[in-house]
């Protein structure tokens, strides 16, 4: 009898049971015999009890198994819109402590966007969402789930959740020797590691950008070395002593505990912290090749490599040349463990405490002086006087101007001090103690040197110096009499370093010699055509003109660069076309090298005939061969309290989204007796619908319009009653 009860129980449950794991579905009909004996053997009462229990427990366990997510159902929003939401939320509340970012880490849209960015770096072209294959979506979802379930491991070289579309390697067919080479030699970051790095970067960047100090400018969106130079020109005028600090040794590597402590000040999500900590502590495998083990191999005739369509093209020659002009302060890019693109952001997070500490020192050091001094007001105050005038420093009396400013670009800092040198020495001592306590970095006086403005301060390949002027100050006395006195002022000069420019040209093999620089031929362009070579160098010169945009000696430095490039090309063409000297090259190709050069006369038809037929490229002459052709220095005034455009848009959007802003605008309109365009249009539409009054018949004045509406409303109330009251209130709203 009990076993019959079990059979009845199973038949009664068949309408509701669904086994998801094995995809067995029970219909409303009776269970057929071929299926039932596989589940429960009803004929054997001894084994039947255990079988029934195992069957029910298996069904309950399979019920608890989650259904795999479908990537198509997870794409509810565009990835860029999700990023915009994160930026708005963090800039609305910049001081809040973020306890969890699991919501955004689960958003599949961010993972797809990270996949597109990494594919663009890998293949050289942006992959739209419609071009992503279904298998890639599934693999990307598996990678996301592995990160959420703590199954993801950094630097996995043989076990991948997702692979690059460009990677066609069959790991199963690799030999033991190749597998050993993969596991023991230096390898670039894997494709899936870069995707995880991009996702973490998209989540953490808006959190910390809302908190970072306005005194830091490196590795941040919208801030460039040009921004630093303009800030220095705007805020550092009149400073006598400068502290130039080199903290770049911190960028070489920092203890994981210090980085995690810096992260925990604002973000306390355990999943993200554990991911970053694992990326920092996972060892990076680097192969060591001894010089004695290198085998000498004969150079074989190699065919010219042809790039595939989906393979990223190398940077052009002009771009590679320009990026080697990077200043010393911007040359080093931090790379910590397996963090990849996260490393610059983590460096700024660690330096952020130093920035805020320096901001407190700026406020404590500032001491205003009211006599015989004209300067810019402190942060947040109103402008006093014309900012384009020099700043005047009193040279006698008990009162002395005390003011200080600070900027940081990467691991390099610059502090300007207006006051005695003893104040700068005291600040340097405090800064050394702070770095020793906070970063365990032993600094000496050489890494934090104090220099006077008269010696010239080198920063970002520009020299900061001053010009002293003695203008006449006109001061109005109490009785209205104008008193003229002589003052002392300084103008800050920001000039490009000719010495640094020559040093970089020598490093690029464009130049030889110090006192009498001699251009050297750039043989890397030997096999290129004259038109292509000139076009490459023109792009390089245009980029140099933009780089030295804010240098006071812009014309001189660009003219020097043009001279070096022109001499280098002339020597190249002399060797290529066997003309023996630069003079013969200039005689044939002119000063700008715009005329075509030929190996022998009469071998080919005239150049103009070939150009007309479209058989040759037009040769563009070199730019900026004369100093008069170089544009002037950009002295456009830099606004106080400057912020990048994207931050301005964010702050404006947040302000307009606040209901208080709308209420303030409405109150302001009421005080001035004005009416907003939206309200006026709603009144026009309402009156047109209610009384069939044309727009032309309505009064233009807002007050007359309001009076006419009130009169019409009173008439309508008498005739129609309550319905017209509700309609008028709707029109008012």
Image (tube, helix red, strand yellow):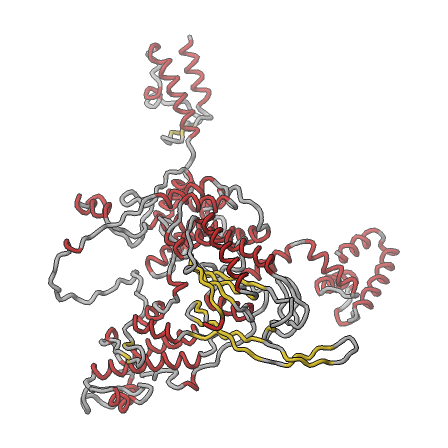
Asked whether residue 79 appears in the rendered view, the answer is no
Residue found at the very far right of the displayed protein: 718
Q: Is residue 434 left or right of residue 602?
A: right
Q: Give the residue at x 63% y 62%.
A: 367
Q: Quadrant of the N terminus?
A: top left
**Horizontal and vertical percent position of residue 244:** 46, 63
Q: Is residue 649 left or right of residue 287?
A: right
Q: Nearer the viewer, residue 413 or 585?
A: 413
**Horizontal and vertical percent position of residue 642:** 56, 65
Q: Quadrant of the C terminus?
A: bottom right
Q: Is residue 499 above or below residue 641?
A: below
Q: Nearer the viewer, residue 192 or 381?
A: 381
Q: Give the residue at x 52% y 61%.
A: 424
**Horizontal and vertical percent position of residue 556:** 42, 81
**Horizontal and vertical percent position of residue 671:** 79, 63
Total residue callouts: 0
Asked whether residue 361 appears in the rendered view, the answer is yes
Q: Nearer the viewer, residue 361 or 695?
A: 361
Which quadrant holds residue 319?
bottom left
Residue found at the very far front of the displayed protein: 397
């Amino acid at each position: 009898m009990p076993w019959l009860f079990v059979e009845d129980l199973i038949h009664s449950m068949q309408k509701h049971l669904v086994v998801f794991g094995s995809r067995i579905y029970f219909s409303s009909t009776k269970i057929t015999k071929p299926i039932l004996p596989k589940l429960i053997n009803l004929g054997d009462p001894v084994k039947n009890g255990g079988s029934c229990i195992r069957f029910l427990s298996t069904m309950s366990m399979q019920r608890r198994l989650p259904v795999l997510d479908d990537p198509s159902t997870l794409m509810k929003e565009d990835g860029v819109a999700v990023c915009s939401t994160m930026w708005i939320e963090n800039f609305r509340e910049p001081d809040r402590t973020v306890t969890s970012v699991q919501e955004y880490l689960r958003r599949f849209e961010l993972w797809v966007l990270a996949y597109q960015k990494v594919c663009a770096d890998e293949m050289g072209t942006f992959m739209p969402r419609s071009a992503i294959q279904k298998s890639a979506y599934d693999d990307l979802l598996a990678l996301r789930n592995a990160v959420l379930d703590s199954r993801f491991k950094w630097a996995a070289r043989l076990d991948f959740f997702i692979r690059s579309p460009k990677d066609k390697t069959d790991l199963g067919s690799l030999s033991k020797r190749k597998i050993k080479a993969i596991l023991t030699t230096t390898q670039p970051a894997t494709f899936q590691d870069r995707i995880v790095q991009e996702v973490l970067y998209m989540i953490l960047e808006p959190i910390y950008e809302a908190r970072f100090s306005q005194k830091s400018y490196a590795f941040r969106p919208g801030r460039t070395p040009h921004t630093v130079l303009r800030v220095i020109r705007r805020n550092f005028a009149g400073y006598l002593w400068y502290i130039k600090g080199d903290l770049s040794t911190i960028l070489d590597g920092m203890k994981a505990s210090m980085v995690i402590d810096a992260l925990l000040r604002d973000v306390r999500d355990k999943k993200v912290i554990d991911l970053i900590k694992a990326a920092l502590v996972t060892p990076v495998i680097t192969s060591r090749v001894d010089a004695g083990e290198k085998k000498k191999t004969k150079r074989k005739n190699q065919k010219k490599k042809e790039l595939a369509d989906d393979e990223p093209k190398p940077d052009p020659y002009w771009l590679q040349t320009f990026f080697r002009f990077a200043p010393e302060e911007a040359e080093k890019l931090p790379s910590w463990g397996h963090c990849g693109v996260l490393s610059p952001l983590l460096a700024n997070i660690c330096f952020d405490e130093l920035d805020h500490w320096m901001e407190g020192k700026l406020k404590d050091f500032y001491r205003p002086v009211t006599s015989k001094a004209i300067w810019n007001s402190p942060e947040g105050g109103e402008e006093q006087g014309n900012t384009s005038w020099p700043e005047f420093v009193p040279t006698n009396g008990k009162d002395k101007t005390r003011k200080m400013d600070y900027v940081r670009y990467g691991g390099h800092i610059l502090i300007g001090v207006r006051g005695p040198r003893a104040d700068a020495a005291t600040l340097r001592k405090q800064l050394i103690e702070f770095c020793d306590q906070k970063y365990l970095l032993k600094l000496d006086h050489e890494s934090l040197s104090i220099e006077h403005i008269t010696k010239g301060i080198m920063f970002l390949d520009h020299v900061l110096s001053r010009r002293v002027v003695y203008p006449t100050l006109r001061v109005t006395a109490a009785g209205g009499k104008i008193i003229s006195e002589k003052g002392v002022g300084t103008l800050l000069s920001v000039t490009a370093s000719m010495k640094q420019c020559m040093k970089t040209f020598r490093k690029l093999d464009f130049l030889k010699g110090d006192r009498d620089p001699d251009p050297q031929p750039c043989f890397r362009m030997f096999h290129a055509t004259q038109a292509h070579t000139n076009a490459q160098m023109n792009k390089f010169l245009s980029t140099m003109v933009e780089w030295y945009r804010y240098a006071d000696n812009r014309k001189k430095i660009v003219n020097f660069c043009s001279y070096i490039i022109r001499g280098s090309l002339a020597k190249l063409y002399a060797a290529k076309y066997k003309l023996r000297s630069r003079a013969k090259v200039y005689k044939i190709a002119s000063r700008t090298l715009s005329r075509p050069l030929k190996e022998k006369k009469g071998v080919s038809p005239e150049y103009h005939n070939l150009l007309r037929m479209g058989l040759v490229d037009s040769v563009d002459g070199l730019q900026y061969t004369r100093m008069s052709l170089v544009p002037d220095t950009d002295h456009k005034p830099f606004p106080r309290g400057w912020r990048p455009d994207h931050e301005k848009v964010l702050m404006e959007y947040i302000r307009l989204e606040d209901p208080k802003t709308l209420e303030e605008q409405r109150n302001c309109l009421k005080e001035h007796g004005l009416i907003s365009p939206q309200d006026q249009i709603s009144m026009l539409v309402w009156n047109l619908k209610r009384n069939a009054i044309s727009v032309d018949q309505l009064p233009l004045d807002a007050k007359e319009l309001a009076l006419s509406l009130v009169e019409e409303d009173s008439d309508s109330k008498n005739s129609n009653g309550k319905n017209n009251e509700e309609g008028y209130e709707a029109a008012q709203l």
